Image (cartoon, helix red, strand yellow):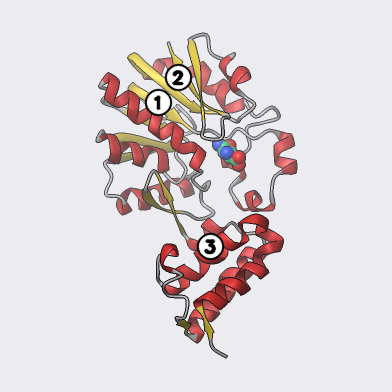
Amino acid sequence: MSINVSEAVREAKIMLEPVAQEEALQQAKIFVSTIAGIETSALTIHSEMVLAPEQLNDLGEMLNRRLQGEPLQYILGEWAFMGLPFYVDARALIPRQDTELLAETAIRFIRERGFGSCLDLCTGTGCVGISIAKLAGIRVTCSDISRDALSLAKENAELNEASVSFVESDLFDRIPDKFDLIVCNPPYLTLDDMQTMQKEVTFEPKLALYGGGDGLDVYREIAWEYEKHLSEKGMLLLEIGSTQAESAAALFSARTSVLNDLGGNPRVLIVEP
Ligand code: GLN
């Protein structure tokens, strides 16, 4: 049985509908183009290209994993953040587009204020710290409590040839230094969020998601300690959940402001002592 690219997209879309709903077509295109070794934007030009039996086999395996609820990004093994490539797997949270606001804001302040050092706490895949190091051209320290996450972040630093160093640390516990800028996308889901989250999110590490009953546990710890680790005129940037702007800001006695993401939701809390 020979199947060409356009037939494969059509069939994959129908299979994916129960798990991917309105994203079924887009995900089908991503899987088929990956298997065919072409860009998603080139699918139409190559619509008549016949897929080899091994390619069909690989496509079937990918679709089966996706049908079990596994996120597309883990199945592909690589995902873009800030236009840079990152390996992704179950060792760390998948980079979200919303988090690009945190990285962009960090880069903007580094340029405007001439910040020379940056700490990325709870680095996970390393996507925030590595993007900052690459795009703002400063050295970044990336830290995480999870050894697994750090091993993935190290692979990503190599992939991007980024100038970053790594520390295994529970928040500030093993961070002796001061930094001009501290950025952090902490776990902030509430108990309620954890009980109602999409199947896909259950494949991601709980440690990277759960922020205690009200989602604010890690912000409380950061609020307690961050000032000791900021240089004079330093700044703290935190990703927040869309409903946490006021409750997270209330934990800090310093001046705070909030930036909204592309969806119009509060996403980044700026803390300036
Ligand atoms: N934004 C993620 C989600 O909605 C949560 C990430 C986090 O806790 N930092 O699943």
**What kind of residue is marked 2?**
Tyr
Of the numbered discs 3 and 2, the one sitting upstream in the chain is: 3
Residue 271 is situated, as x and y percent measured from the top left of the image, at 46, 17
- Res. 18 in view: yes
Q: In this view, does 154 lie to the left or right of 209?
A: left
155 up-or-down from 136: above or below: below
Secondary structure at badge 1 equals strand
Please name the residue that numbered disc 2 is placed on: 226
| The C terminus - image quarter | top left
Secondary structure at badge 2 equals helix
Q: Does the residue at mark 3 contact the one at mark 2 (Cβ under 8 Å)? A: no
90 up-or-down from 34: above or below: above
| The N terminus - image quarter | bottom right
Residue 9 is situated, as x and y percent measured from the top left of the image, at 56, 71
Secondary structure at badge 3 equals helix
Please name the residue that numbered disc 3 is placed on: 75
75 up-or-down from 252: above or below: below
**What kind of residue is marked 3?**
Ile
Q: How far apart are marks 1 and 2 (CA)?
A: 8 Å
- Res. 177 in view: no
Please name the residue that numbered disc 1 is placed on: 182
In this view, the mark in front (1 or 3)? 3
Q: Distance between the residues labelled 3 and 2?
A: 37 Å
**What kind of residue is marked 1?**
Ile
Q: Does the residue at mark 1 contact the one at mark 2 (Cβ under 8 Å)? A: yes
User: Mark 1: is the Cβ under 8 angstroms from ligand 1?
Assistant: no
Q: In this view, does 239 lie to the left or right of 160?
A: right
Of the numbered discs 1 and 2, the one sitting upstream in the chain is: 1
Q: Foreground: 108 or 237?
A: 108
Q: Which residue lies furthest to the bottom in this view?
A: 1
* Residue under the image location 35 percent in, 17 percent down: 234
